[in-house]
Amino acid sequence: MRFVDEFRQQEAARGLARALAATAARLERPVRIMEVCGGHTHAIFKFGLSELLPAGVEMLHGPGCPVCVTPRGKVEAAIALARRPDTVLVSFGDMLRVPGRRTSLLEERAQGADVRMVYSALDAVEIARSNPDRTVVWLAIGFETTVPGNAVAVLRASALGLENFYLLTSQVLLPPALRAILDAPDVQVDAFIGPGHVSTIIGTEPYRFVAESYRRPVVITGFEPLDLLQGIHMIVQQVAEDRSQVEVQYRRAVPSDGNPIARRIMAQVFEPVDQEWRGLGTIPASGLRLRESYAHMDAERAFAHLMPDALPDSSACRCGEVLRGVVRPPDCPLFGRACTPERPMGACMVSPEGACAAYYRYRPHA
Ligand code: SF4
């Protein structure tokens, strides 16, 4: 398959690994590289890329899985709305299994709640259009990659004049999270693998502060094995040459200016807001809420009396530390015992992009 097979050739991978090892031999100290996209985390484990890295190059897993960073309070809010009579709660599939305080959306559905899984925000609009006597709530989570789709759904619902369509938002922006990680006293990161998908929307400019103010390299990278090996090599070259720049390995998908049309639609519908992240706390201007002209679709406003207080992360689950790269999944005492993909105790074990789920699937005895 074009754009897949050509980026999975074993001999080319071995050649890149040799070049990476030669460059890493020039490093004066170990380098810790954080991948901040769950797709990268999944690919690194799936293809066993950690085994190809030379000594002195270490990968950390960051907060790039949208399901994982959605705070527990938002899950509880979704459950409270799902329990409401004549309400349809619509979500991406992974969110259904994230545990709340006592149940999950999937368990609520088993108890009779109308919880539906879809593949796009426009599917939720269609459910609202064809069920005018029901309240339809779209659980709008995600990074910059999925926000344009949520914005289009709002514009579509508005054009249709729907009065029964609402959004419960937990939309997050990556650059403020990078700043929070760089400012965190317990996180040691030397460079970032930049997210391939988010960057198709935002381009390269929003990462410039990482390279210029924090002096950390960022290389926006694709998702196949050769992409990742090349992206890691580009980072190690920067460190070896004492450079810190924003570079793009994933040129076949990421233009420098991203997707201005998608950004314009996002800005038309949403505005920045302080946002709570699981594991990172509340980060200033790191989320997006509906602008005043669309606030009548905001589920948190319309059903404010049902919204729970913020919930702290579960004391047993170490997902928050996993998301900051402070601990690895096997460091959690519940990993593989009380917490498995079949019975997840935390969000990091739910989504295939979560570090705990990736570890469990590909390195169960790590
Ligand atoms: Fe949380 Fe489970 Fe990961 Fe432990 S293994 S940090 S309980 S998600």
Image (spheres, helix red, strand yellow):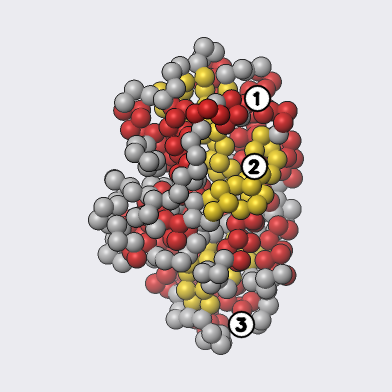
Instruction: Judge the density around disc 2: few (<14), some (14-19), many (≥20) Cα neighbours within 10 Å.
Output: many
The CA span between labels 2 and 3 is: 38 Å
Residue 260 vertical position relative to residue 31 in the rendered view, above or below: above
Q: Residue at x 65, y 32 (%)?
A: 152
Asked whether the residues under the numbered discs 2 and 3 touch, taking CB atoms below 8 Å apart as contact, a structural biologist would say: no
**Quadrant position of the C terminus in the picture:** bottom left
| Label 1: element kind | helix
Disc ID at residue 104: none
Find disc 2 in the rendering and name its residue: 288
Query: Compared with residue 311, is residue 110 higher up or lower down, i.e. above or below?
Result: above
The residue located at (55%, 33%) in the rendering is 168
> Which residue is disc 3 drawn over?
240
| Most distant residue in the top direction | 133
Q: Tell me which corner region of the image, top left, top right, bottom left or bottom right, holds residue 322.
A: bottom left
Rendered location of residue 357, percent (x, y): 37, 54
> Which kind of residue does numbered mark 3 sit on?
Ala
Relative horizontal placement of residue 47, taking residue 262 as reference (left or right): left
- The residue at 47%/69% (across/down) is 59
The residue that disc 1 covers is 296
